[in-house]
Image: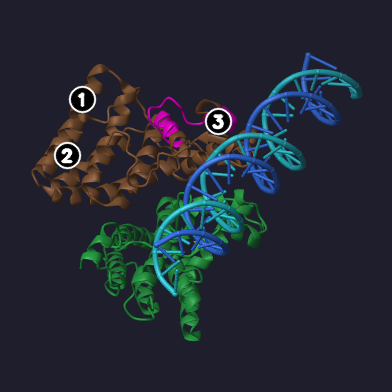
Chain colours: A green, B brown, C blue, D cyan
DNA sequence: AACGAAGTGATCGTATACAAAAATTCCCTT
DNA sequence: AAGGGAATTTTTGTATACGATCACTTCGTT
């Protein structure tokens, strides 16, 4: 069955819209704060607003899109606090995931991990930042797939997407290589069956990414106007 | 804040429908597998199918409702596998939550926890099972609120709801008291600042609930027909 | 009488229409 | 010329209409 409608993904039209938007956001072609007008998207995908709204509401539930009443949908801009919470949750969940992944290791998985690493290295070598960003996230999802835990997998998928937005908003230096090197080390630990090392490397990897960000509060919320005017 | 619409929830009409359905499911007035017809719900809440669909899709994303294409929405029936995954995720997340809750302990929180326990004990004493079920879940959410981690809170809210369905489907004995006693022990550990004990008690509490269930596979999925006919 | 097929009714998927709110433009006033 | 306000335009919120799919009933055939 080429047109896979099995597990979760359906080839229905709202999923097509959702996936199209998600990919654009994950590849940083749509930046945080971008307005996502219903009519505009509807014209692009040749669909009515009904379907577009369904797709946007899904993405909103995943935290990738923010919907403001009577104002419309925008690509989400995670606050520093949300960013920290996302990283904390990723450490927790990916720690558990990697332990399960180690137990599931096999030759088949080793090959899939190697292929993934090769694709990542290739994208970085070619300087294709957009592909590199996406593939970096996909590595984490591949490990989650190994863990054979659908709930963890779907949770991580949301967290990875939010991480992508977070990095774009708060990174200190211009480019950020999520590090194929790190991924390779983690892979080695997994395939060699060293669970505690794999877990430690994974968490360090995540904490390092977070450390490269500037997550100081900016007090963008209310009352700032008064402060500014009186300052 | 009795009718809590603060953080994310808006007092809009789709939220009213969603919350109404959710409450009915959490109190086991709507049982797993129940058909949730769009027109039927629309008449009850005096709303058009547009709004009902939005509410149902939200609940579907939370795993409380299952939507089958061209067949409609039903109260979810978590599989044994989904049930196990839910409990594993709860152990992981509530372990982290309770550690954070211990750090946040204060006189104010002690009072809120006490009130919650009193309400639970009262419901059990009155034999009001429906309220008891709901309040038992609310205790866990109160601890999550202490943890001051919006992401963990929203994740746990979904997990608690699915747990409610799971218990209904798979419990061995007729009634299941989620145990005010357990909750009281956990509360004591939290307010006394004993993080490791609180965490251990919380995880034991969850594992004990899971142990009271019969989560053996029933092979309800595909290919069973062939097996039955050939058997 | 049992099985199967066509027809009928109910329910869902999607588009569109209309109302309400927000954003923008334009004009008037100072 | 700058600021404010009303009219206009755009966009979202919600209801409804219509076609498609599924479930059920009924009728005919073996």
CA separation, marks 1 and 2? 15 Å
Please say if the residues under marks 1 and 2 sit with CB atoms less than 8 Å apart: no
Q: Which label is found at residue A157?
A: none
Image x and y of residue A173, in percent:
33, 81
Left or right relative to B111: residue B96: right
Which of the two discs, 2 and 3, sits closer to the camera? 3
Left or right relative to A171: residue B36: right
- The answer to whether any part of residue A11 appears in the image is no
- Residue with the mark numbered 2: B186
Quarter of image, res A33: bottom left
Q: Which residues are magenta?
A: B18-41
Image x and y of residue B139, in percent:
25, 36
Q: Identify which residue is drawn at 49% across, 76% down.
A: A130
Dot 3 lies on which element? helix
Chain of the residue on which disc 3 is drawn? B
**Comes first in the chain, label 1 or label 3:** 3
- Residue with the mark numbered 1: B121
Left or right relative to A6: residue D19: right
- Point out the image quarter for the N terminus of chain A: bottom right
Chain of the residue on which disc 1 is drawn? B
């Amino acid at each position: 069955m080429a047109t896979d409608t099995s597990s979760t993904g359906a080839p229905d039209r709202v999923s097509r819209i959702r996936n199209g938007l998600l990919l654009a956001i994950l590849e940083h072609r749509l930046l945080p704060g971008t307005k996502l007008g219903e009519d505009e998207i509807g014209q692009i995908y040749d669909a009515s607003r009904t379907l577009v709204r369904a797709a946007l509401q899904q993405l909103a539930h995943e935290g990738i899109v923010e919907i403001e009443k009577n104002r419309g949908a925008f690509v989400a801009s995670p606050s520093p606090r949300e960013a920290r919470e996302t990283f904390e949750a990723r450490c927790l969940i990916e720690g558990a995931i990697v332990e399960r992944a180690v137990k599931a290791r096999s030759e088949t998985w080793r090959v899939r991990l190697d292929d993934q690493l090769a694709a990542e290295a290739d994208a970085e070598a070619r300087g294709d930042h957009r592909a590199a960003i996406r593939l970096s996230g996909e590595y984490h999802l591949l490990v989650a797939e190994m863990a054979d835990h659908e709930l963890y997998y779907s949770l991580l998928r949301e967290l990875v997407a939010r991480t992508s937005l977070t990095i774009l908003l708060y990174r200190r230096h211009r480019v950020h290589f999520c590090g194929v090197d790190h991924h390779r080390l983690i892979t080695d630990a997994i395939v060699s069956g060293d669970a505690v090392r794999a877990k430690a490397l994974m968490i360090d990897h995540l904490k390092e990414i977070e450390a490269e960000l500037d997550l100081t509060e900016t007090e963008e919320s209310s009352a700032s106007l008064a402060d500014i005017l009186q300052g």
